[in-house]
Image: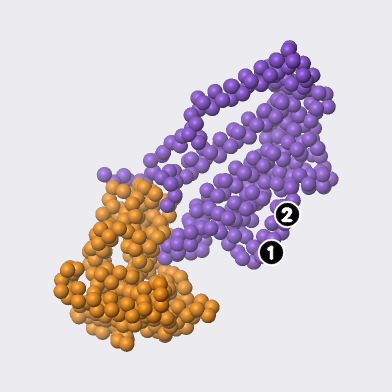
Chain colours: A purple, B orange
Amino acid sequence: MVPELPQATPVAEPTSTRDGIPGVYRAFSIALFVLLWHVISVANRDLVHFFDPILIPGPVEVYQAGIEFSKSGQLQRDIIATVYRVVAGFGLAALTGLLVGVAVATWRPLAVLFEPVIELLRSIPPLAFLPMMVLWFGIGEASKIAFIAYAAFFPMFITTLEGVKFVDPVLVRAAASLGAKPMHILRYVVLPAALPGIITGLRLALSLSFFVIVAAEFVAADSGLGFMINDARTFFLMPQMLLGAIVTGIIGFLFNELFRLLEARLFRWRKGGRT
Amino acid sequence: METSRDAHALAHQEPAAPKIRITGVSKAYGVNTVLKNVDLSLAENSFTCLLGPSGCGKSTLLSMIGGFARPSKGSVIVDGSVISEPSADRGVVFQEYGLFPWRTALDNVAFGPMLAGRSRVEQVATAQRYLAMVNLAGHENKYPSDLSGGMKQRVAIARALANEPSILLMDEPFGALDAQTREILQEELLRICEQKKMTVVFVTHSISESIFLADQIVVMATRPGGVKEVIDVGLPFPRDRASHEFVALEKRIKQSVREEVDKLGII
């Protein structure tokens, strides 16, 4: 029987079995690692005395630091500060990277004008510009957001550019022969075809955002997870430093999972491999 | 050279203006001349095969009729006006299918009606009708990656037909399919052409395929590419590949094509 509406049957992506490793084994692997860490920390403190015990806190100490910091509300404040900067900077980068990428890929004069400059800037590690950004934008929010936006722009721009450039020309011809005008082709052919690349760009840009925000908060901030780590360094508070690192990792992981869900939802058509 | 400059008019028609007229068309890419001085007239509702070895410019000629490429010299005239760009009135079927992998079979076929501004209900109804015409009823919600090569090409044909074009251009549409699927699709194409009045231009390098399908066969020359001869097939449908006339014509065309292949040297 012919269904009335072309609603595709949703195919559940196996989110818990990435690369074919079931979730149970994943949890086990992580638990084993934490256990090993605990054993090393305790052994160092009570038996070996190889390092000063202050330098090798165990998972228990980090957990206690977490409780303490969240009770005082400082952990939440730092998380919010960092996430706000990442979301703002990343959002800015995603939008401009997408727009500039599509424009440069579809309009040749822009490519001639911009591509060489972008290639040049891309080869300079973004961190090299951090001190300058601080001088330009101060130590407030603006400098951090601008810095993330700058760093995350490149992966977004490059993947969009490649995605749009390498759209199968037969699809463009097919659309044109069916009556599509250039704006239709952009909307119904080029963007959907480039979307997988664009999503990859978003993920790369996001992980780069987390990468650079921690560095930026080392240099110029009075809040955020990077600040929390750097502040703890001054006072030799190892559990607090590790707490900052772990929390940053968890947030990055959660954001990445969000994108994986989005991908699974958007690319149901890819399930049987590419056409 | 037996190049016919007159329209191949069907018996019951008056000698009307040709549907497609190609006059003095040459195409060069840099110093490389792909086609030289092609003159051709295709009557309305006729089925023409462009036949020849690789490098004779048959696909280039088709893409100029499609409006994807422009002649370096001369012009392609459809319904009395020179064409310069693709149009929904000229449907195209590609050897590589050209289906949108992110759209279901139904949404691929509904693409043309959607661009034409039809309502969603009309789009769905049209797409279902044409999918049924190519015997794909029940496969509406499958994505191209779930379909076999033959089914993909059926969707592509349905998609081209859904715009109700007066011209259907087919670029080696069955070239990537296995022999059995190919013969079945040839038969179905003839059935569809009986139902829908269309002027079909079909590019192929299979002699048997061209005799089975075409009203007229344009044998292409090589070095430079062009028209060698135009053959009116004149056999009644359905054609029997084992019949004496079929085999005799096949032999004669084979000879003609062979001369052009030999001009290419060792291949």
Disc 1 marks a residue whose amino acid type is Leu
- Name the side, left or right, on which A92 lies relative to B126: right
Q: What x and y, as percent, mark residue B171?
A: 37, 67
**Visible residue check, residue B75:** no
Quadrant where the N terminus of chain B is found in the figure:
bottom left
As drawn, is A29 to the left or to the right of A180?
right
SS under mark 2: helix
> What's the distance in space between the residues labelled 1 and 2, CA to CA?
14 Å
| Residue at x 25%, y 58% (from the top left corner) | B180
Of residue B220 and residue A75, the one placed in the foreground of this image is B220
Residue at mark 2: A121
Which quarter of the figure has residue A9? top left
Subunit of mark 2?
A
Residue B116 placement (x, y as % from top left): 41, 61
Disc 1: which residue: A113
Decide which of tag 1 and tag 2 comes sooner along the chain: 1
Estimate how packed mark 1 is, as few (under 14), some (14 to 19) or many (20 or more) residues with alpha carbons within 10 Å.
Answer: few
In terms of secondary structure, where does tag 1 sit? helix
